[in-house]
Image (spheres, rainbow, N blue to C red):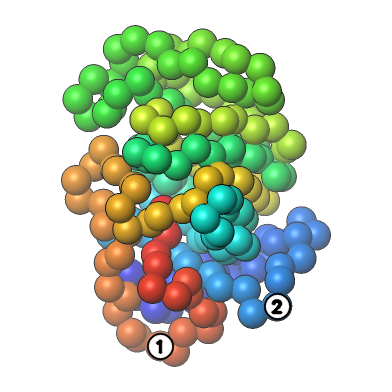
Amino acid sequence: MKQSEVNRLCREADECFRLQGWILPPNAQFAATDFGLGDYRAAGLVEVLLANEPEYCEKIMYASENMSTPAHTHGKKKEDIICRSGELRLTVWADNPRLTPSVGAVEVQINREMRRLLSGEAFFLKAGERITLTPGIWHEFAPSAAGTLIGEVSTWCDEATDNFFADPRVDIFHAIEPDETAEYGGFPSEASS
């Protein structure tokens, strides 16, 4: 991913945050990724890490319409993914979708109510709605409407050792090609999930 693409994506995110009335803390740290796949319009995400303490983590995230965060799971992290504005399409799986794409069912909390979904079933969250994901539930998400902001509240986020992607090509720590100066500060020694 080129630095010019990172800057462009972060500017889009910053503008969306402003339009939605989301006030960021001073010196907010942005991280943008194309997941090492080379097409950030298809698979990409901007995160602003608001807190990452031993007991909890909070992020606000941006992706343009249909920009996907590829299927992944966490071994330790429990998280709520919250549609802060717009509409968010999610898909969950009982197991790695590259190995068993549509086998079984998944029990998750959506808006604090337990629901049983078919593995591989897509569903939508509207603004204010949330899903609680426990460790081991495979998931991917993408905004299905313009102006969608995605929140995350979770246990501590360990980007380096607790992200497991179905696509082995995914590299969240890929190098940025320096074709221009960085406009937004990144996470100290971290990358996106």
Q: Could you tell me which residue is drawn at 70 percent across and 78 percent down?
A: 26
In the depicted view, which residue is nearer to us: 8 or 163?
163
Q: Could you tell me which residue is drawn at 60 percent across and 46 percent down?
A: 153
Say which element carries label 1: loop
Which quadrant, please, contains the N terminus? bottom left
Residue 53 in percent (x, y) is at: 55, 59
Q: Is residue 124 left or right of residue 44?
A: right
Q: Could you tell me which residue is drawn at 30 percent across and 24 percent down?
A: 95
In the depicted view, which residue is nearer to us: 77 or 183?
77
Instruction: Please determine whether, in this image, residue 117 is positioned above or below residue 86.
Output: above
Q: Spatial distance from mark 1 to mark 2, Cα to Cα?
A: 24 Å
Q: Residue 26, which numbered label?
A: 2
Residue 115 in percent (x, y) is at: 57, 13
Q: Amino acid at mark 1?
A: Glu
Label located before the other in sequence (1 or 2) = 2
Q: Are marks 1 and 2 in contact (CB under 8 Å)?
A: no
Q: What residue is shown with label 1?
A: 180
- Please identify the residue farthest to the bottom as the structure is shown: 181
Instruction: Please determine whether, in this image, residue 65 is positioned above or below residue 186.
Output: above
Looking at the rendering, which quadrant does residue 44 occupy?
bottom left
Between disc 1 and disc 2, the foreground one is: 2
In the depicted view, which residue is nearer to us: 192 or 123?
192
- Please identify the residue farthest to the right as the structure is shown: 21
Q: Could you tell me which residue is drawn at 46 percent across and 53 percent down?
A: 157
Q: Residues within 10 Å of mark 1 (few under 14, many from 20)?
A: few
Q: Residues within 10 Å of mark 2 (few under 14, many from 20)?
A: few
Residue 41 in percent (x, y) is at: 42, 55
Say which element carries label 2: loop
Instruction: Please determine whether, in this image, residue 167 is positioned above or below residue 52.
Output: above
Instruction: Please determine whether, in this image, residue 181 is positioned above or below residue 157.
Output: below
The reply to whether residue 87 is visible in this rendering is: yes
Q: Amino acid at mark 2?
A: Pro
